[in-house]
Amino acid sequence: MDLPPAHPHSARSQGVEVHPVIAGRWSARSLDPAAEVTRAELLAVIEAARVAASWGGTFPVRFLAGLRGDTTHAALAALLTRGNLRWAPAAGALVLCAVATSNAKGDLPYAMFDAGLATAQLSLQAVAQGLIAHPMSGFDRAGARQAFDIPDSVEPVVLIALGHLAAERTNERDLEPRRRPALREVLFGEAWGQEF
């Protein structure tokens, strides 16, 4: 398994080992504008997302994807906010993740949680394939709804840049230290704020 290079300032282990695919996940911006994401690679990351856990087996998550060079990729790139527009169009694929907020049985209260689980599994499958998956909140949701005729019952959640890491990291944010709270700051026992 050829994993993409780790973040130069990866969060150091808290004395607990995690799987290399999980440890190797990061949201790089320095993507290779010439490297292709194949249809098979795209289908594999979507399949990984599709088999994610889902509340009541509802799986309200849906995806819309384009490969660089096609009209869908161009339309998704046009929705990006200025900061993401500087780097994300270089991605070999752009993937819009959306969720249905209700179905025939009523409201789906955990739809956003399901979208998070699906996106996480998509990201880990990308790493396992030697790719980078970078979820972005900076895009025009109303524009996505209009451009792709998304129904009112479906909420665009995140736009994901999928690609290969460039040989040279040209985006300065890719060189900044990765910040995560210490394990003792996120895991409590007996009472909130009390170290486990």
Image: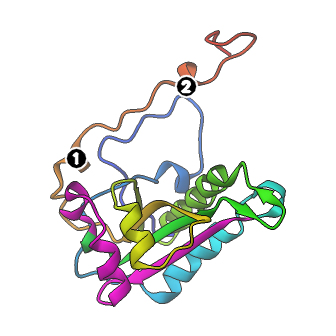
The range drawn in magenta is: 59-88
Which residue is at a point 22% across and 64% down the rendered structure image?
A: 85
**Residue depicted at 68% across the width and 16% down the height:** 196
The amino acid beneath tag 2 is: Leu
Residue in the foreground of this view, choosing between 146 and 40: 146
Query: Residue under circle 2?
Result: 183
The residue that disc 1 covers is 173
Mark 2 or mark 1: whose residue is earlier in sequence? 1
Disc nearest the viewer among 2 and 1: 1
User: For this view, does 99 lie left or right of residue 158?
Assistant: right
Q: Is residue 94 visible?
A: no
Closer to us: 12 or 122: 122
**153 vs 182: above or below:** below
Query: From the viewer's perspective, is 168 left or right of 1?
Result: left
Residue at point 41%, 37% (across, down): 11
Q: Secondary structure at mark 1?
A: helix
The kind of residue tagged 1 is Arg
Q: Position of residue 96 (x, y in %)?
A: 46, 69
**Quarter location, residue 139:** bottom left
